[in-house]
Image (cartoon, rainbow, N blue to C red):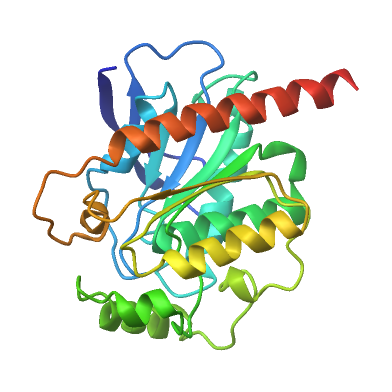
């Protein structure tokens, strides 16, 4: 499916206007899911840039908004989360936002540091606006500030460990470590939106990603997870190099399509009960 891309400004977000890049499949229509997608960048990156992941989700028929969530208030916790949640709240009022319609599912998603923000927004939505969020897509989310997992120790070939350490230090420099800032440390994770969790065997963030997926499942949260094989080109997610062309984009599209079918069925079942 061809994907259309346009840059917009979300003018009426509570924390202030936010620039965003919107991806939508050329065949999107009434009821297309809305995805609020948070880009990666080790908590340090600002600006609106092209996203292969957002494009892959749009190919599944979604309308994907990728905001410059660090720009309005800065990139030290809790400011990016406040902006992210404000955008989520804005998009939840689908008629006012002009993105999607009242039949659209609303999903938060993110990769790496953006996966952290997505998980945090899912927590905050559970606590304040639970009925508005239908799902979360966490793509190798950066969740553990201690970075002590086996996969991080063994797989630093893409040279990200130091950057992630610097990013965590910056993100938490406001003081303290709130559970919304480090979701893997949160003691109460039940009741959050259903999750699609994606990673790869050769991803340094594999262990914390799968560990979090297991905790969600143990807490009664519906979870769909997929681990790509090593050599799929996944390190390119972080700007790393690989010897062959990446082939994970179609997997993301396929997994997302199946996830949307799952949560659509759950949503219909809740409405009819």
- As drawn, the residue found furthest toward the right would be 273
Q: How many dots with numbers? A: 0
The relative height of residue 74 versus residue 55 in the rendered view (above or below) is below
Tell me where residue 266 appears, x and y as whole percent.
Answer: 73, 28
Q: Quadrant of the C terminus?
A: top right
Near-viewer residue (253 or 50): 253
Q: Is residue 142 visible?
A: no
The relative height of residue 8 versus residue 45 in the rendered view (above or below) is above
Q: Residue at x 66, y 43 (%)?
A: 194
Q: Residue at x 46, y 57 (%)?
A: 115
Instruction: Please give left or right for residue 183 compared with residue 254 in the image.
Output: right
Q: Residue at x 47, y 63 (%)?
A: 80
Tell me where residue 209 appears, x and y as whole percent.
Answer: 50, 63
Near-viewer residue (6 or 16): 6
Tell me where residue 114 appears, x and y as whole percent.
Answer: 42, 58
Q: Residue 253 occupies which quadrant of the picture? A: top left
Tell me where residue 202 appears, x and y as whole percent.
Answer: 31, 63
């Amino acid at each position: 499916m061809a994907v259309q891309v346009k840059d917009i400004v979300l003018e009426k977000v509570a924390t202030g206007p936010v620039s965003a890049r919107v991806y939508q499949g050329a065949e999107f229509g009434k009821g297309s899911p809305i995805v609020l997608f948070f880009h990666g960048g080790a908590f340090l990156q600002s600006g609106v840039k092209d996203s292969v992941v957002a494009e892959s989700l749009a190919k599944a028929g979604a309308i994907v908004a990728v905001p410059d969530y660090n720009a309005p208030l800065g990139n030290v916790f809790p400011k990016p989360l406040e902006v992210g949640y404000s955008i989520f709240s804005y998009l939840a009022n689908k008629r006012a936002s002009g993105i999607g319609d009242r039949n659209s599912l609303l999903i938060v998603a993110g990769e790496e540091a953006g996966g952290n923000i997505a998980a945090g927004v899912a927590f905050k939505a559970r606590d304040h606006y639970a009925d508005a969020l239908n799902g979360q897509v966490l793509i190798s989310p950066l969740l553990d500030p201690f970075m002590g997992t086996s996969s991080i120790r063994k797989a630093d070939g893409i040279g990200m460990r130091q950057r992630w350490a610097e990013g965590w230090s910056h993100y938490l420099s406001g003081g303290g470590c709130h559970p919304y800032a480090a979701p893997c440390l949160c003691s109460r994770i039940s009741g959050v939106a259903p999750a699609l969790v994606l990673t790869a065997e050769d991803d340094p963030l594999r262990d914390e990603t799968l560990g979090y997926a297991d905790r969600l499942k143990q807490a009664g949260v519906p979870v769909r997870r997929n681990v790509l094989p090593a050599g799929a080109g996944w390190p390119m997610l972080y700007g790393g190099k690989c010897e062959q062309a990446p082939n994970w984009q179609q997997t993301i599209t396929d997994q997302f399509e199946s996830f949307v079918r799952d949560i659509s069925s759950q949503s219909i079942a809740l409405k009819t009960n």
